[in-house]
Image (cartoon, rainbow, N blue to C red):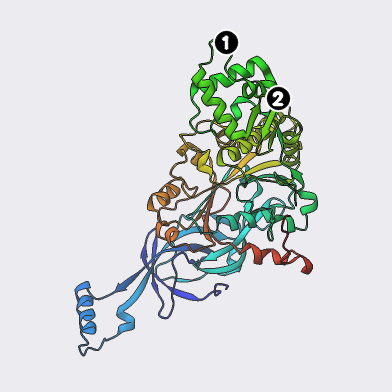
Amino acid sequence: MSASAGKTVGKIFAGDINEILIRERRGCSVELGALLVSEFAGMKILFEAVNVAYGSIVTLNECIDIAWRFSEKKEYRLHEEERKFYNVIHARPLAVINENGFSKPKLIPPMFGSVREISDSDLNFMMRENDDSVAIGSIRSGSSQLNTPACLKREAFTHHVLVAAATGRGKSNLVKVMLWNLMSNNKVGMLILDPHNEYYGVRGVGLKDHPDANKMLVYYSMKNSCVNQTLKINLESLKPHHFYGVIYNLTDPQRDAMEIYYHAHGKKWLFRLLADDKPPGDNKINLATFTALKRKLESVLGLRFDAAANKFDNKLNIFVDFGGESTVADITSKVTCGSKVVVDTSDVGGETELLIGNILADEIFKFNRNAKDEGKLDSFASVCIVLEEAPRVLSETEGDNAFTRIAREGRKFKVGLIAITQLVSVIPRDILANMNTKIIMGNELSTERRILIESAAQDLSKNDHIIASLDKGELIVSSIFTPFALPVKVPLFEDYIKNFMKPKQQFTIDVPG
């Protein structure tokens, strides 16, 4: 449904530079979040309806009395009802539009000026999809969808994107649409850590159905069916700091024990630690500390050393002592060259999943940091890492890890995050401040809305009720890369990609095994 173009909705009768009041025209029904336009002196001011209220030229007591008469079915006839009773639209100015583009509002339209609904022609100044931008949906006015695409600059993905919403509001659908539109862009590499195996499209449509999937998409999984690459990581690729901030309740003495083994044995430190039945006899590591640490590492790695057979019993077959030597380097090379790499971690526990992500994120960050030091960073693609349930690693309690380092420093090295979460309240404020694009979907929790509003790139102080009322697929994009906070409607992924797929591709199902 497209918003009606040019229909007058009312007249301005009061207000100031922060908010104007509009008497709604009889028969109109302006929705919360609707985009409105006032034209004068060769320019346009774009407004957003932030509240709709009743208005009357009679006193409140008179209105109460009239309501009583009607409720008690008393005989009563309203005089000049259309003149005396009306709706008031509270509208916040978003931008001034003229022939030179747009600017921040620094003036107000004339008293009694007309206000109309927005049309697509009013948004000709908006950025269109190209090599330097990515479409995420269409501009929305209230619940009506316009034809103007809502786009993010490519640069936004290295300045971090936060996707925040309550359960069931369409976070995964949004990310799928975003990734689909990034697939052909070789200037942005993507590492997609997928704990639910929902992005590649193993059991339905997904990124594998993109026309450029054969040359741009790589899929890693621990399963052998329907995969490009089997996920195996050699134990020699792991260093002690890979476990920090992702293994729960890892104590300082246990960290010290890992560092002692690493300095003593180098790349073979994990082999030795897991194979030993007790700590070295130099008394640097307490027996209880060693036993607890070994138990944690065996659990997260899915490994147990069988002394009788002199080999590892491997339950997960991801972390291996033979093979997988180049996996981490291969994935890093692919994403820094612009490919999109999906890593399926749906069959492992939370700590194992986070360890895999931390290893890969750490290597990518180090690669780009070294490339910048050598003056070669511009030779590589920007990299963005999709991180589901972000508070698991972006929180005060989990400490420092590759993800927190990227959140704080990544943009200097062209590495960004798409951090997806239901709870922004547990993410440290300094990390939230570094998320320069916030995609805000519906949320009934007032504490979560307040934090999002306070950390947004634009003033959203009057948008609390709008955020609470957002339906599935509706969102607000607040970014330093957008002219104002964009109201957006995201299409359903399965319907959206039909426009890009050949007829024989549509609704194909690829089931492993």
Query: In the picture provided, is 458 more to the left or to the right than 224?
Result: left
Q: Residues within 10 Å of mark 2 (few under 14, many from 20)?
A: few
- Res 496 → quadrant: bottom right
Residue 98 x/y as whole percent: 57, 60
Residue 58 visible, this orientation? yes
Label 2 residue SS: loop
Q: Residues within 10 Å of mark 1 (few under 14, many from 20)?
A: few
At label 2, the amino acid type is Asn
Query: In the picture provided, is 431 more to the left or to the right than 306?
Result: left
| Residue pointed to by mark 1 | 281
Q: Residue at x 44, y 70 (%)?
A: 113
| Residue pointed to by mark 2 | 310
**Cα distance between the residues tagged 2 and 1:** 22 Å
At label 1, the amino acid type is Gly
Residue 473 x/y as whole percent: 54, 62
Quarter of the image that includes the C terminus:
bottom right
Q: Are marks 2 and 1 in contact (CB under 8 Å)?
A: no
* 488 versus 77 height, above or below: above
- Tell us which disc is closer to us: 2 or 1: 2
Residue 125 x/y as whole percent: 61, 59
